[in-house]
Image: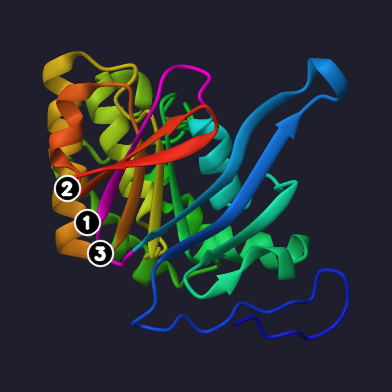
């Protein structure tokens, strides 16, 4: 699936087959520490996520949800097993290939928002496009479209400190969509929000999956939000338990 160009970090991303799953995980293991003190976060995890689905990942605190998201997003490396994202097997990628994957195919949404305080909402959304050296006119049009999509078209020039928590998370979602990713990875995106705002953000993610044609893997501890998912995966004792 992966096209090899040689060198430690010179592996190119494979073309993503339209009919294959967005995520394929096979026999994934990840431990921290050694000996009796080792923590086995993942023990032989295997699952697939089709394209265009919003999948919720649940589990108690410390169950390995963040570990799994970091592995799928290429931010961490498994001890054993394989991860394929959008047709590319991650173990075949060096650092340059992983950077390209994260930049071009994956959008990240975090509980802490991760916005740059001195930048306006529009400037925050435009950061990924600047890193990609997109044409300024294309960048401005994409930023305006995304802020409109998340309902913040009138807040483009406000800085994060001038926005509510829910509005900041909406800016973060818009930023995650800037480079038209195939996959959104969200780690407790409503964790800092009140219940009503959290529901609104989850509704937005649901609408984004449908409207933008992306796949989303969303970790959440809130049982009220699981109803927005097409499927629920639960992490328990390092294993995945699938729910309807």
Label 3: how many residues lie within 10 Å, few (<14), some (14-19) or many (20+)?
Answer: some
| Secondary structure state at the residue bearing disc 1 | helix
Residue 211 placement, left or right of 184: left
Q: Are marks 1 and 3 in contact (CB under 8 Å)?
A: yes
| Secondary structure state at the residue bearing disc 2 | helix
The residue nearer to you, when weighing 122 against 239, is: 239
Q: Find disc 3 in the rendering and name its residue.
A: 52
The numbered disc on residue 206 is 2
Residue in the image at 13% along x and 51% along y: 207
Q: Quadrant of the N terminus?
A: bottom right
Residue 218 image offset from top left, x and y in percent = 34, 40
Span colored in magenta: 50-63
Q: How many dots with numbers?
A: 3
Residue 138 placement, left or right of 208: right
Residue 25 image offset from top left, x and y in percent = 52, 57
Q: Find disc 1 in the rendering and name its residue.
A: 209
The mark that comes first in sequence, 1 or 3, is 3
């Amino acid at each position: 699936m992966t096209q090899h160009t040689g060198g430690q970090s010179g592996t190119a991303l494979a073309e993503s087959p339209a009919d294959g799953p967005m995520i394929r995980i096979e026999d994934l293991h990840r431990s921290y520490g050694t000996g009796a003190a080792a923590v086995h976060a993942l023990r032989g995890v295997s699952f697939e996520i089709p394209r265009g689905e919003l999948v919720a990942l649940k589990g108690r605190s410390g169950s390995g949800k963040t570990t799994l998201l970091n592995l799928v997003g290429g931010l961490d490396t498994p001890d054993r097993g394989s991860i394929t994202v959008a047709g590319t097997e991650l173990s075949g990628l060096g650092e340059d290939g992983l950077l390209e994957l994260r930049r071009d195919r994956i959008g990240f949404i975090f509980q802490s928002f991760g916005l740059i305080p001195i930048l306006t909402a529009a400037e925050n959304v435009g950061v990924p496009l600047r890193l990609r050296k997109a044409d300024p006119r294309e960048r401005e049009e994409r930023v305006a479209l995304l802020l409109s999509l998340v309902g913040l078209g009138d807040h483009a020039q406000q800085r994060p400190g001038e926005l509510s928590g829910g509005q900041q998370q909406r800016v973060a979602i818009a930023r995650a969509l800037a480079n038209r990713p195939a996959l959104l990875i969200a780690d407790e995106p409503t964790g800092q929000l009140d219940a009503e705002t959290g529901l609104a953000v989850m509704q937005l993610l649901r609408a984004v999956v449908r409207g933008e044609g992306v796949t989303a893997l969303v970790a959440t501890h809130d049982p009220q939000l699981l109803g927005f998912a097409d499927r629920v995966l639960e992490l328990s004792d390092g294993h995945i338990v699938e729910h309807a």
